[in-house]
Amino acid sequence: MKINHVAIAVNNLDEAVKEYQNVLGVKKVEFETVDAEGVRVAILYLENSRIELMEPTKDTSPIKKFLEIRGEGLHHIALETEAIEGEVDRMKDTGVRFLGEVRPGSGGTKITFIHPKSLHGVLTELCSHTKK
Ligand code: CO
């Protein structure tokens, strides 16, 4: 397993991207809108991983609710595994609680989330690239 990305909830994506790029000196950025999750995402490419900044695109977005309750900050980390279904089965045996089934994520990935209560307060995404 390795860290695929760290996701941060922000109020204003364009402002946040400029600040992150300026402070970290990151050049490569891609934008993506995920309608199903109600977010617009900026992906900042680091040498070995990515930071994803996310802003809500609608009032029903879970990110909107997160920002109202917690304010800006770390939303989740994403761990990449080669075979997500196998990992999920293995983790279910350890009593881990998942948020939803394995489902399509962005860019042809498969994803699911582990409840923060199962990992000491950190919402954790599991992701896997769909085999071509
Ligand atoms: Co993510």
Image: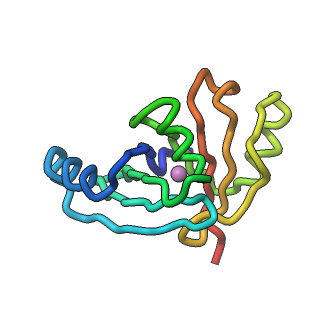
* Residue 126, position as x, y percentages in the image: 63, 48
Q: Nearer the viewer, residue 104 or 14?
A: 14
**Residue 124 versus residue 33 in the image, above or below:** above
**Residue 116 versus residue 25 in the image, above or below:** above
What residue is drawn where x is 44% and y is 36%?
Answer: 74
Q: Nearer the viewer, residue 88 or 22?
A: 22
Picture quarter with the C terminus: bottom right
Left or right: where 118 falls relative to 18:
right
Q: Residue furthest top?
A: 120
Q: Nearer the viewer, residue 130 or 59?
A: 59
* Residue 29, position as x, y percentages in the image: 29, 64
What residue is drawn where x is 45% and y is 62%?
Answer: 40
Q: Nearer the viewer, residue 18 or 3?
A: 18
What residue is drawn where x is 74% and y is 43%?
Answer: 99
Left or right: where 100 falls relative to 25:
right
What is the basis of the colouring in this image?
Answer: rainbow
Q: Quadrant of residue 96?
A: top right
**Residue 39 versus residue 117 in the image, above or below:** below
What residue is drawn where x is 54% and y is 66%?
Answer: 34
* Residue 120, position as x, y percentages in the image: 61, 21
Q: Residue furthest right?
A: 93
* Residue 24, position as x, y percentages in the image: 18, 46
Picture quarter with the N terminus: top right
